[in-house]
Amino acid sequence: MQKPYGNKAYHQTQIATASREKILLMLYEGCIRFFKKTKQAMENKNMSEKGEMLAKAQDIVAELMNSLDHEKGGDISRQLEALYVFVFDESTEANFAND
C-alpha cells in the first residue's frame, strides 16, 4: 500500500490524532462545505457535481445520526436526531426540486 504524501498525509494525521469534539467539528464543517458546493453546482446546472456533493453531505449527516447515543445523550441526542432527519429530508427535497 502506498503511503500518502503532503496535504493528504497531514489531513490523515490530523484526523487520527483529533479529539472526539474536534472530529465532530470537522464533520460539521465538511457537511456545510459540501452543501455549499451542492448549491453552487445547482446554480451552475452541473447535475453530476450536484449529486456528488449532495451525497457527500448526506453521508456526513447520516454518520452524525448513526453516532448518537440516546442512552448517554438523552434529550439532547433526540433533538439532534430530529435536526439531522430534518436536514436530510430537506436536502433530499431540494435535490428533487433542484432548488
Image: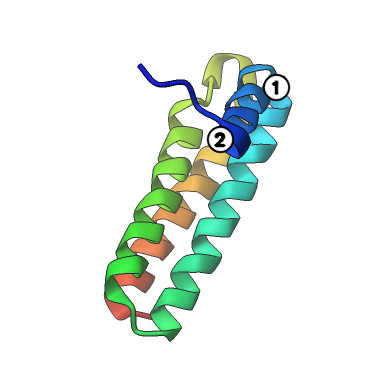
Front position among marks 1 and 2? 2
Q: Residue at x 42, y 75 (%)?
A: 41
Q: Residue at x 47, y 44 (%)?
A: 61
Image quadrant for the C terminus?
bottom left
Of residue 5 and residue 49, the one placed in the foreground of this image is: 5
Per the image, label 1 sits on a secondary structure element best described as loop
Q: Residue at x 48, y 56 (%)?
A: 87
Q: How many marks?
A: 2
Tell me which corner region of the image, top left, top right, bottom left or bottom right, holds residue 77: top right
Q: Residue at x 46, y 42 (%)?
A: 60
For badge 2, the amino acid type reads Lys
**How is the structure coloured here?**
rainbow
Say the numbered circle drawn on residue 28.
none
Give the image location of residue 26, x and y in percent.
Answer: 65, 39
Against 52, residue 14 (above or below) is above
- Residue pointed to by mark 2: 8
Mark 2 surroundings within 10 Å by alpha-carbon count, few (fewer than 14), some (14 through 19), many (20 or more): few
Give the image location of residue 40, x and y in percent.
Answer: 49, 76
Give the image location of residue 36, x and y in percent.
Answer: 55, 67
Image quadrant for the N terminus?
top left
Against 28, residue 88 (above or below) is below
The reply to whether dot 1 and dot 2 touch (C-beta < 8 Å) is: no
For badge 1, the amino acid type reads Ala
Q: Is residue 79 left or right of residue 34?
A: right
Q: Earlier in the sequence, mark 1 or mark 2?
A: 2
Per the image, label 2 sits on a secondary structure element best described as helix
Label 1, label 2: how many angstroms apart (C-alpha)?
Answer: 15 Å
Say the numbered circle drawn on residue 18.
1
Q: Is residue 75 visible?
A: no
Mark 1 surroundings within 10 Å by alpha-carbon count, few (fewer than 14), some (14 through 19), many (20 or more): few
Q: Is residue 34 left or right of residue 52?
A: right
Of residue 66 and residue 35, the one placed in the foreground of this image is: 35
